[in-house]
Image (cartoon, grey):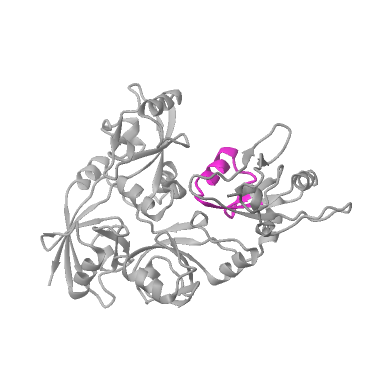
Amino acid sequence: MRKICSVQQCFSVSFRSDSVSTPRPRLCVLKRDEGESYGFHLRVEQGRQGHIIRNVVLGGVGGCSGLQDGDRLLEVNNFYVVDVPHAEVARKIRLSGHQLCLLVLDGDEYEQAVSQGQDLEGLVRAHKGEGCKPPRLCHITRDSVSGERGCFSVSLLAGGAAENAGVCRGDRLVWMNGATVSELTHSALSRMVWSQNGCYINLLIDSESEKNYMRQKMPVLPAMAVPHNLPYRARKLHLVSGSEGYGFLLRQEKTPSGRMSHVLCEMDRGSPAERAGMQDGELLLEVNGVPVESLEHEEIVARIKQSGQHVSFTTITPQGLEFYSQLGLSPLLFCEDVANEKEKESSEPASIAKQSPQKEMDGLYKPRLCYLQKGPLGFGFNLGCVPQSPGTFISQVVFGRSGQSAGLLEGDVVIEVNGQNVEQKYLEDMQILEEILHTICLLRRIYIHLHRKLLLLLLY
């Protein structure tokens, strides 16, 4: 069946005239089906400036959205890309999933604006207007929602999990655990809330920004979001080869779900891999920014060898990959650069005491017993979980309360309560225990940069 193109998907039109006029960007919203392409190419061309739209397929997704050959790209999913390297722009488009928002400018208008020295970023700001903040992707435990079909706001409890996760009063709920809520009634959403074991990944936006998005006829997408308190993030590692290579093994293994994965393992002590922060059992997603999940083992090894002395890897834990797969998102959307994180840590004030490397290593493998006394506002921590999966972890530690004083860290995984193994317990079971207890004794075991294991002894 042929696609029927709708010109209504292109929300702004540029009218040419002989007089000097302000260029008018166009917002094009592209939505494709599984296995379908967006129907255009993105290129850089010698002698021409900008990221250029080419080969727009007649009747394809891009053509029906209003894209035209020669258009210049200004934004991808609300992110300004004019001065961003071409490979990174292409990557943002590739990771967007089945829906994509492109802000473009006619090719002639773009070249004229550049020749006149116009501020393209200012042009984009003027087009979008004020008060257009990005949405937030928040990991929170159960709180109530209110609203009518297609419009839901979050009701906050003082000191509750949502407030601690960064949710603001009046935030609009757009998306929950991979499902858009715009077509749901309140009762349907409530049933969905109570069926998720009390653990949610919510896409939220403040009410003023929502109005701005609606005015522009721009959808609010997870790819536009700023992550808050997510339990898993992909990590970018930078390795410099030593005299004996990088010091790790790469194996191809089948996961419990049946998919083939490339597993990083057996890091040599003191090797470039260990120094870069590589973790045993992590899965390899990218080599030098290029996806490799679909490649064969030999192809990946060849790419690493071709990199010479320097190579970058993007990795994630198996649990993290499962987490994003359940949400229908690419784990590469919210990637953190390990080198940048280390640089931030090294810039901390010198007054902060540092453990010696050996003492730190020893401490990482020794379980520690932590006692928490329940205060008027609780134990001062929140539990989280992977949606629809057993097992819980510490998702939030409230500053100045019992949890922080006892040494709890975000990411600690609960494995025992009063000597009873709870690794297969769901979040709701743990929350019931937490409500009826007054004193907690925690024995926790930490593994380097992995999920820290906790033995919880909850005392009545």
Judged left or right of residue 113, residue 233 is: left
Q: Quadrant of the C terminus?
A: bottom left
Look at the picture and state if 221 lies above or below 50: below
- Residue at the spot 42% in from the left edge and 66% down from the top edge: 166
- Image location of residue 73, percent across then percent down: 66, 47
**What percent of the width, then of the height, locates residue 329?**
43, 52
**Magenta stretch in the rendered image:** 75-103
Q: Nearer the viewer, residue 5 or 181?
A: 5
Q: Position of residue 441 (x, y in %)?
A: 16, 64
Q: Is residue 76 above or below residue 254?
A: below
Name the foreground residue: 325 vs 80: 325
Number of callouts in the render? 0
State the residue at coordinates (71%, 43%): 69
Q: Is residue 14 visible?
A: yes
- Up/down of 369 relative to 270, above or below: below
Q: Is residue 117 left or right of residue 211?
A: right
Q: Quadrant of residue 201?
A: bottom left
Residue in front for this viewpoint, 319 or 359: 319
Of 61 and 44, which appears nearest the observer?
A: 61
Residue 406 lies left or right of residue 110; in this view the side is: left
Q: Residue furthest top?
A: 243
Q: Is residue 91 magenta?
A: yes
The spot of residue 103 in percent (x, y) is 65, 53
Residue sitting farthest toward the left: 419
Is residue 155 in view from this perspective? no
| Residue 188 found in image quarter | bottom left
The residue drawn where x is 17% and y is 70% is 439
**Outermost residue to the front:** 1
